[in-house]
Amino acid sequence: MNILIQGGRVIDPATGYDEKADVALTNGAVVAIKYIAPGFQPEQVIDATGCIVMPGLVDLCVRLREPGYEHEGMLASELAAAVAGGVTSVVCPPDTDPVMDEPGLVEMLRYRAERLHQARVLPLGALTRSLKGEVLTEMVALTEAGCVAFSQAEIPLVNTQVLQRALQYASTFGFAVWLRPQEFYLGKGVAASGPMATRLGLSGVPVAAETIALNTIFDLVRSTRARVHLCRISSAAGVELVRRAKAEGLPVTCDVSINSLFLTDVDIGYFDSRMRLNPPLRQQQDRDALRAGLADGTIDALVSDHTPVDEDAKALPFAEAEPGATGLELLLSLTLKWANESGLALGNALAKVSSQAAAVLEPAFGAMALDAGRLRVGAPADICVFDPSASWVLEPAALRSQGHHTPFAGYELPGRVRATLVAGRLAYAA
């Protein structure tokens, strides 16, 4: 099918291209930008006047809640939320039920996702069987089934020897390991350690829980040279350790959650369970350091940390409430809000949710380029068209995700997605 996206401002963060131009699509791929062949006959025209045309967003942390947690989210509802937010590729952690530790489960997830014709689903395989931290999974078989990397999700590895062996094995085959840095015993609290947690009587998670884990990971990376992606850095001290590791040349990347980029522990207020999140919200100095680290490239990508939670699991006392919030439909708008507040060039900000996020994944594909996060001739037509001048007030009930809990309820947010295309097919239109 031939599609013409007409009259928009085209931004490709990967190359710095930023110009008003038409974009022509044929058979799921971009065939021309600006210079459209005279004989091109579009079967569909998308009017992008006043809008920005950019690569579809790549979200590195999305819980689809299937299999096992269908009461909190379904594959169909969460992928519909993704394209409504301009997200065309999602990476999902392995903490489903059953855990993604068998090739058959991975193949089933990918098959079901492909039949929905929504966003692309890129699964993470479990690093250890059942995420118990004892026996390594068959990483080669899981990779052949479609896993892009390996993770323990939210469950830290207590046994450092198992982590060392996992990194050695992954390094041998060129696999990446994704870890959220948190020391097991220090990380059992429900809020960030500090005056706010003390005043509220909540058990705290000290910054040391993150920094101890980071130092352990970096020592093991030095000896194994394994590629490690650090998920959802949350502290100023953590950002500084990552900065030093990158300066040393260690093969590490990292991301930060939209929640940690905007909120602090003060937002917990009077035990607001919507602020019950992992990692926990820290102090303002941590939030400021995260923003600076994302702007200067220490942090590679911004993620939604999409975790739909049902009503019963949130309608509990703060310490007992299930951590998590919906975020897929907010990622683009919160990226724009951060760019506006930080005075960052639009293309540089959008790179954090497109080309730079995709770059984290690229080694997993070897000779077969992922080609996500880019808008260029020959690339798959995964495209987001949004109106940067539009604003909207976040009403949780209007979200397409099955999970309606978000700490940003009532916020006025910039940018509105007008159309999302996946492989040249219109997956969402406002």
Image (cartoon, grey):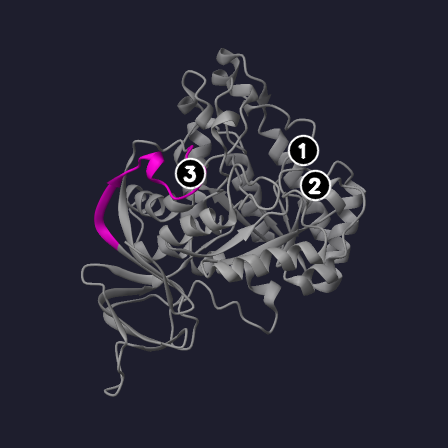
The picture quadrant where one finds residue 95 is top right
Q: Does the magenta run of residues contain 151?
A: no
Going by the numbered disc 2, the residue's amino acid type is Thr
- 396 w.r.t. 170: above or below: above
Determine crowd level at label 1: few under 14, some 14-19, many 20+ residues with C-alpha closer than 10 A. Answer: many
Q: Is residue 114 left or right of residue 393?
A: right
Q: Residue under circle 3?
A: 261
Determine crowd level at label 3: few under 14, some 14-19, many 20+ residues with C-alpha closer than 10 A. Answer: many
Going from N to C along the chain, the mark reached first, 3 or 2, is 2
Magenta span:
387-405
Which residue is drawn at the image coordinates 53% and 37% (left, top)?
Answer: 71
Q: Nearer the viewer, mark 1 or mark 2?
A: 1
The CA span between labels 1 and 2 is: 9 Å
Q: Position of residue 413 (x, y in %)?
A: 28, 41
Where does the N terminus fall, quadrant-wise?
bottom left
Going from N to C along the chain, the mark reached first, 1 or 3, is 1
Going by the numbered disc 1, the residue's amino acid type is Glu
Q: Residue under circle 1?
A: 183
Q: Position of residue 297 (x, y in %)?
A: 46, 52
Q: Residue under circle 2?
A: 216
Which residue is drawn at the image coordinates 27% and 49% (left, top)?
Answer: 416
Determine crowd level at label 2: few under 14, some 14-19, many 20+ residues with C-alpha closer than 10 A. Answer: some
351 or 236: nearer the viewer: 351
Labelled pair 1, 2 in contact (Cβ < 8 Å): yes
